[in-house]
Image (spheres, coloured by chain):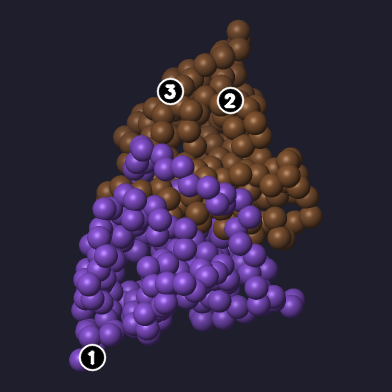
Chain colours: A purple, B brown
Amino acid sequence: MLVSCCYEIPIFLSKKKNFKTYIALFNSELFTLTYGALVTQLCKDYENDEEVNKQLDKMGYNIGVRLIEDFLARSSVGRCHDFRETADVIAKVAFKMYLGVTPSVTNWSPAGDEFSLILESNPLVDFVELPDNHSNLVYSSLLCGVLRGALEMVQMAVDVRFAQDTLRGDSVTEIRMKFIKRIEENLPAGDE
Amino acid sequence: MTILFPSLAKRDSVTNRGHSNSELFTLTYGALVTQLCKDYENDEEVNKQLDKMGYNIGVRLIEDFLARSSVGRCHDFRETADVIAKVAFKMYLGITPSVTNWSPAGDEFSLILESNPLVDFVELPDNHSNLVYSSLLCGVLRGALEMVQMAVDVRFAQDTLRGDNVTEIRMKFIKRIEENLPAGDE
């Protein structure tokens, strides 16, 4: 199947944002299972794990560029002054808010432009096992895209990848985030 | 179609992670519906797939629900309705629909949802006027109740996305299921 470079925007998401004042708090199991249905559907649609990883990342990007607005509205977090502050906000505020977990921030590079988020637990993978024929699947790839898309909307180009993954046999899940560059404000924000 | 990844097998414990905001879930659900609209030719097919996915989710979700809620066996359909509205919806979607419009026989009722996290900021494009966007929920309810020996029919009678004032889910009791029938994935 020929995969287009330009992923369509989630067509159902309206551009208008009238913020609701209530905050819905809920248990994550329905989300976990819905995410599993999404990954399953992509595995039917695409021929190999690398393609599925790529699609999940793109979907995550499109989610992230919208989610950041919700995050900024709910969290009242001001502009971060440096990448260390960004890391703390991601770990202690954003992850907590949307996934109910607080990863630890570790393994800073000497230049201070790269760090790891260590997740003791990850709601997306509760009760998930990778079948043998999907050993290259990075199941939670959506999260990489979400972080990348969200940070792009606050003028940060970052690279995000899973360095360790409990689903693939590692003892923890480690997301590695690297600052690439600051984005000029007048560039158009794109959907991928 | 089975769900490959959340496995039926490993439910030793319940993870108590606390609660989280639903926006990421809303957007992920939107990505799922979008993907299905790419994959299937018409809205009715997408509705059907969402319902099937929901069914497969429901047959797993019920275990989590029973573990977390400590709800005992319901004695009748009215009690079931209350548990669905006040405990289950609250637990997984953070909302409490009202239970109304009981049939005279007591075998059918409506859940009226003032709000639905799945449809936050969602608009249906004109070319998807037959899409029942939240069809996943019908399947979830149907699958979950089947696991507690109730065959039900679940459908959206009203949908704010399609111009109605409220969202109304209509649930009808069909029959009690014998316990020794195998539970299937669809």
Gap between marks 3 and 2 measured at Cα: 23 Å
Mark 2 chain: B
Q: Are marks 2 and 1 in contact (CB under 8 Å)?
A: no
| Residue A119 spot, x, y in % from top left | 29, 69
Mark 3 chain: B
The amino acid beneath tag 2 is: Asn
Tell me which residue sits at (42%, 67%) in the image.
A153
Q: Secondary structure at mark 3?
A: helix
| Circle 3 or circle 2, nearest the eye | 2
Mark 1 chain: A
Q: Secondary structure at mark 2?
A: loop
Which residue is tagged 2? B165
Residue A180, picture quadrant:
bottom left
The amino acid beneath tag 1 is: Ala
Which residue is tagged 3? B82
Q: Is residue A160 above or below residue B61?
A: below
Q: Is residue A86 visible?
A: yes
Q: Residue furthest bottom?
A: A110
Name the one closer to the observer, B36 or A130: B36
Crowdedness of circle 2 by 10 Å Cα count: few (<14), some, many (20+)?
Answer: few
Q: Is residue B46 above or below residue A150?
A: above
Which residue is tagged 1? A111
Tell me which residue sits at (65%, 31%) in the image.
B163
Q: Are the residues under marks 1 and 3 on the same chain?
A: no
Gap between marks 2 and 1 measured at Cα: 56 Å
Name the one closer to the observer, A52 or B144: A52
Task: Tell whether A45 sits left or right of A59.
Answer: right
The amino acid beneath tag 3 is: Asp
Q: Is residue A132 above or below residue A140?
A: below
Tell me which residue sits at (73%, 44%) in the image.
B126
Q: Is residue A56 visible?
A: no
